[in-house]
Image: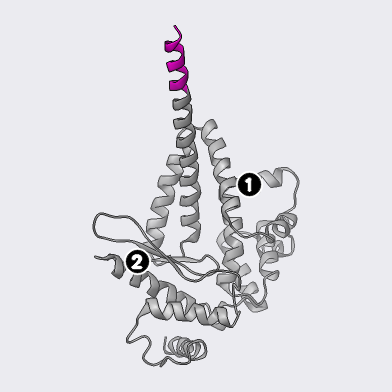
């Protein structure tokens, strides 16, 4: 623990030289320090040079406990894990979680190296009851994961997560399964989607996929949304990175909005048609 603290203080001295590393964790204004940290990183063009800065979002609530999210350049998202009695307190708590993760991301052990890949692949094999030999075969799940890591050597885990979120959502959405059925190899899929970041266009396409699923299985969007909200809440209280759960919520909410809008338009058109019919009888 002492060595980790020394490493984090060393990072602060490098990125925020005007701050005293020995005092920064004792008198922690997390909102200000987090902003300074990422502004400094962007001036150095170290990561995400085309991304915006730190963004906060407070959930609408008539009273406590309040919830706040903070999204970092690149898209990683964190929230307050404590029960907060004010929006300002929730914002500070979310910033503290994001700051600690931002600093940990700078540690050498959070950068993708050959050693990191070997350890990660072993962990993936043990957690899936797979075979280590599969790592050399991109057509397998382990092989695809190995290929993605190899393609991102030198990047930090937050940078790698920006790529991974796309594939997590494609898997959740059913698109990866559909692509496999068209005989596309995992390597081809990875190479194709590695060129894209998650944006409004991709979210809209995924929302349309869920609207099509709703037509086949009425109520599935609401069920999946409730599940996503529970997952988001549990992950937030555990201090985990939240983007995957939050993106699922946004996509499903967008799909519901489209469905509701289409229904209102349909009802309106039916009412207009009925009025015309009655008028000309």
- Tell me if 27 is positioned left or right of 115 in this view: left
Residue 6 picture quarter? bottom left
- Tell me residue 135's x, y (percent): 70, 64
Judge whether 4 appears above or below 165 on screen: below
Answer above or below: position of 24 versus 171: below
The residue lying at 57 percent from left, 83 percent from top is 108
Which sits in the foreground, 233 or 278? 278
**Residue 118 location in percent, x, y?**
65, 73
Q: Secondary structure at mark 1?
A: helix
Q: Secondary structure beneath disc 2?
A: loop
The residue nearer to you, when weighing 97 against 124, is 97
Q: Which mark is residue 81?
A: 2
Residue 261 seen by the camera: yes
The reply to whether residue 104 is visible in this rendering is no
Q: Quadrant of the C terminus?
A: top left
Residue 146 percent coordinates (x, y): 68, 66
Check residue 182 for magenta coloring. no
User: Relative to 118, is 7 on the left or the right?
Assistant: left
Residue shown at the point (73%, 59%) measured from the top left? 191
Instruction: Tell me which label, 1 or 2, sits earlier in the chain.
Output: 2
How far, Cα to Cα, is label 1 from label 2?
Answer: 32 Å
Which quadrant is home to the N terminus? bottom left
Q: Quadrant of residue 95?
A: bottom left
Residues marked 1 and 2 touching at CB (< 8 Å) = no
Identity of the residue drawn at 55% across and 68% down? 74
Residues drawn in magenta: 270-281
Q: Residues within 10 Å of mark 2 (few under 14, many from 20)?
A: many
| Residues packed near mark 1 inside 10 Å, few (<14), some (14 to 19) or many (20 plus) | some
Whether the magenta-drawn stretch holds residue 273 is answered as yes
**Residue where numbered disc 1 is placed:** 175
């Amino acid at each position: 623990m002492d060595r980790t603290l020394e490493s984090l203080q060393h990072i602060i001295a490098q990125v925020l030289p005007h701050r005293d590393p020995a005092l920064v964790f004792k008198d922690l204004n997390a909102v200000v320090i987090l902003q300074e940290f990422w502004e400094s990183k962007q001036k150095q063009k170290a990561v995400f040079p085309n991304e915006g800065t730190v963004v906060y979002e407070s959930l609408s609530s008539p009273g406590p406990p309040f919830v706040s999210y903070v999204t970092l350049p690149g898209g990683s998202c964190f929230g307050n894990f404590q029960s907060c009695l004010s929006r300002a307190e929730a914002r500070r708590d979310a910033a503290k979680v994001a700051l600690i993760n931002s600093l940990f991301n700078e540690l050498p052990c959070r950068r993708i190296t050959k050693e990191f890949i070997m350890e990660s692949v072993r962990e993936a094999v043990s957690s899936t009851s797979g075979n280590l030999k599969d790592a050399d075969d991109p057509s397998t799940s382990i092989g695809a994961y190995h290929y993605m890591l190899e393609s991102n050597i030198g990047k930090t885990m937050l940078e790698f997560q920006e790529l991974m979120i796309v594939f997590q959502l494609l898997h959740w959405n059913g698109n990866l399964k559909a692509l496999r059925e068209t005989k596309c190899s995992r390597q081809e899929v990875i190479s194709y989607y590695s060129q894209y970041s998650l944006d409004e266009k991709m979210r809209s396409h995924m929302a349309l996929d869920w609207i099509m699923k709703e037509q086949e299985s009425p109520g599935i969007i609401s069920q999946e949304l409730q599940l996503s909200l529970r997952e988001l809440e549990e992950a937030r209280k555990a201090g985990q990175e939240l983007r995957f759960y939050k993106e699922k919520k946004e996509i499903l909410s967008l799909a519901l909005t489209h469905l509701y809008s289409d229904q209102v338009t349909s009802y309106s058109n039916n009412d207009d048609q009925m009025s015309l019919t009655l008028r000309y009888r």
